[in-house]
């Protein structure tokens, strides 16, 4: 196997591994979100509103961390795919997949909702007029900064 073929094979393998990792991350986020919804109901029923608010304000940090990991893997995977496409003739799998992927961008966005929706919890708390303690206000602003960073990191998908 020549050097170029070996590089091509290794990079395709890297893409496959990253795709598996991204799907595992999304599945984990979905399971976590479901578990946190159940925990939230128990907290709503059996604890103070302050405890519930703290719980809701901690969730965005957890999901922001998962999202940043997702984004780093996604950007690296797309860079590798772009590199492979530049080395391969205009047709081929990379060319076909790049065109096909544009048609399903909404689906690609929807699969990230388990990562993104929990990050909007501070906005929901503000919209419903929840009374936040001063330290909870600070935490809500920290969560909002993480949400802004997440949106900023996804900007490359818009163009």
Image: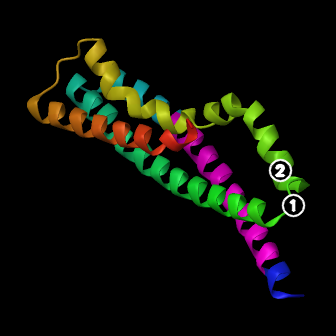
Question: Which label number is shown at residue 95?
Answer: 2
Which mark lies nearer to you, 2 or 1? 1
> Is 22 colored magenta in this rendering?
yes
Name the residue rendered at 70%, 31% in the picture: 107
Query: Does residue 35 appear in the picture of this structure?
Result: no
**Label 2: element kind:** helix
In the rendered image, the residue lying farthest to the top is 128
Q: Which residues are magenta?
A: 7-33
Q: Nearer the viewer, residue 87 or 130?
A: 87
Residue 1 at x, y percent in the picture? 90, 87
Query: Does residue 66 appear in the picture of this structure?
Result: yes
Residue 126 at x, y percent in the picture? 26, 18
Q: Nearer the viewer, residue 127 or 47?
A: 127
Is 13 drawn above or below residue 30 in the view shown?
below
Q: Nearer the viewer, residue 2 or 15?
A: 2
Mark 2 surroundings within 10 Å by alpha-carbon count, few (fewer than 14), some (14 through 19), many (20 or more): some
Location of mark 1 (residue): 89
Name the residue rendered at 67%, 49% in the picture: 23
Residue 31: image quadrant is top right
């Amino acid at each position: 196997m020549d050097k170029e073929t070996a590089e091509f094979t290794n990079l395709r393998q890297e893409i496959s591994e990253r795709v598996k990792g991204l799907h595992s991350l999304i599945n984990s986020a979905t399971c976590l979100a479901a578990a946190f919804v159940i925990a939230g109901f128990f907290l709503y029923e059996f604890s103070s509103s302050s405890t519930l608010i703290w719980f809701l304000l901690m969730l965005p940090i957890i999901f922001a961390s998962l999202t940043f990991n997702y984004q780093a893997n996604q950007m690296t995977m797309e860079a590798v795919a772009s590199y492979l496409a530049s080395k391969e003739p205009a047709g081929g799998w990379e060319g076909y997949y790049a065109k096909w992927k544009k048609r399903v961008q909404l689906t690609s966005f929807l699969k990230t909702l388990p990562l993104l929706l929990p990050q909007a919890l501070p906005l929901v708390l503000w919209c419903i007029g929840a009374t936040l303690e001063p330290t909870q206000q600070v935490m809500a602003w920290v969560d909002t900064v993480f949400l802004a960073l997440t949106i900023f990191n996804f900007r490359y998908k818009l163009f």
